[in-house]
Amino acid sequence: MNFREQYERWINSNVISDEMKNEVRNITDEKELEDRFYKELAFGTGGLRGVMGAGTNRMNIYTVGKATQGFADYLNERFKHDVSVAIAHDSRNMSDEFAKAAALTLCANGIKVYLFETLRPTPMLSFTVRHLSCKGGIVITASHNPKQYNGYKVYGEDGGQVTDEHANEIITKVNDVTDYDSIKTISEYDAVKSGLLVYIGEEVDKAYIENVKSLAIRKELVEKNAKDLEIIYTPIHGSGNVPVRRVLSELGYENVHVVKEQENPDGNFPTASYPNPENPDVFKLALKMAEEVKPDIIFGTDPDCDRIGVVVKNNSGEYKVLTGNQTGILLTNYVLSSLKELGKLPENGAVIKTIVTTEAVRNIAKDYNVELIDVLTGFKYIGEKIKEFEETKSNKFLLGFEESYGYLAGEFVRDKDAVIASMLIAEMTLYYKSKGMTLYDGLMNIYEKYGFHKEQLVSIELEGKEGQEKISSCLDKMRQNEITEINGAKLVRKYDYEMSKEVDLVANETKKINLPVSNVLKYVFDDQSWFVVRPSGTEPKMKVYLAVAGSSLEDSEKKIVEFKEKVMTLVKSML
């Protein structure tokens, strides 16, 4: 069915509201109309994410309803009876409406729903699924995307985002819903009266907060000195404000200064058009506050509070936003060294990272005799490994992280958690302060000991149908192109995750990659530099991850500039 036929079907539907029909009737740009209707908004392995608005390729109550009907069909077929689902949402526009619509569709299918009445962080949804023994979960969020986006993420009964096997089963059920007329729903009154819709209360919040507090490592240090730490925190108009401040307050951190202009939830993100803690611009107001407060640490969480960005003062007195990799390096070193010092480091400990995340932690893990495990990009694969550890008892999970500012400790949540991370970062900063050091000093010490690694991410925006085709074509050309060296460094290993193949060019051996199939290419060179090319799973972008190792901070910074220039010239020649 072409986009014109989809459009006609939309405006002639008996289910679609007049408001939604009129929105597309008034579009005069043919390209815009095509983008809205050339496909159904894809329910991928993580759920839905897209621009809000009318059309089959947009986030609206009809596409949310279709996804939910498919999810309900999957759950009822798989579990037969006693099926329940937890639902949460963040601060984005329409998030509460989408959450309610999803809840009522599930209830109409006989599924009990536990619904948060007000916004909560994504990791709290993960916790709730496990805490209430639900068969699944939904969170309405587009994470750190711009304000025009929203999304719909699906969780399994283990509290992790559904991984590929179950996601594909759900996708099949969603695709079987071919008509919006077949989406079931029920009134809120009837759902509550029948006991199918239950609103979640304080008991779950309290249980979550207590679990987070239990992860404090140096409890005596925190108890005695937390009051001495000066923190500036921004929730960037999102869901982190209440839980982050509550955890820190209950642990004794008395001096937490919140950026007032970014304190309240607001889906328009008036002070941050791109509400991503990777973006230094979101910290402008915090840095202005820092002129008066003189903080020991600044951090900010994204709208659904699963990512956290950290700002530190360097030795020149300048504030710098740490990369996600740098925060991960600091946390890995702090967690492992603290556990060892306290005699709590298990013999079978494991740290998990993604294939695009820094290799700098490999030497740290080796030093503490801890296994470092790589998984595909996406925190759901870290959650999947935690579940595997739980079932096989093969390893004890200590920390998981990805370069895109996501971190997790503990086993009661199975997704990245910025509430947990904020607590650990505050404790880590307090520890270094007790040694007369800043967090930046700590990072430099780690580099001196384990090597100067530098990473960078380049995102190439490629919108619409043509953009997706360009990304696929580029990766196909990269596969066919025989790369032998970059900037004088020889290629020693090539990983093709779509073909599940690792080629060792030195040993002239080919091995099978035992990870799920994914359209990703990774190239590793003999000077420890590497790069990865992959399509974004959540935005219309192609992502290129770059990494180098140098003899000093200055050397690594010089190398990344040269390496980036050569790699991007190569990649762009394939577009």
Image (spheres, rainbow, N blue to C red):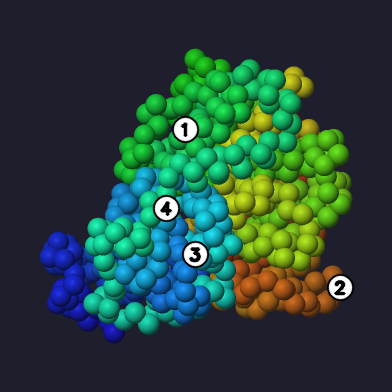
Per the image, label 4 sits on a secondary structure element best described as strand
Instruction: Kindly give the residue lying farthest to the top in the view shown.
Output: 292
Residue 234 disc label: 1
Give, as a three-letter code, the residue at label 3.
Gly
Q: Residues within 10 Å of mark 4 (few under 14, many from 20)?
A: many
Near-viewer residue (34 or 125): 125
Q: Residues within 10 Å of mark 1 (few under 14, many from 20)?
A: many
Give, as a three-letter code, the residue at label 2.
Ala
Residue 507 disc label: 2
Give, as a three-letter code, the residue at label 4.
Ala
Q: Residues within 10 Å of mark 3 (few under 14, many from 20)?
A: many
Q: Which residue is mark 4?
A: 88
Q: Are marks 1 and 3 in contact (CB under 8 Å)?
A: no
Distance of label 4 from label 2 (alpha carbons): 50 Å
Mark 1 / mark 4, whichever is N-terminal: 4
Q: Percent x, y for residue 573?
A: 54, 66
Q: Percent x, y for residue 513?
A: 72, 73
**Which of the 4 image quadrants contains residue 555?**
top right
Q: Which residue is mark 3?
A: 136
Distance of label 1 from label 4 (alpha carbons): 21 Å
Tag nearer the camera, 1 or 3: 3
Distance of label 1 from label 2 (alpha carbons): 50 Å
Seen at 56% across and 72% down, the residue is 164
Seen at 55% across and 43% down, the residue is 207
**Which of the 4 image quadrants contains residue 130?**
bottom right
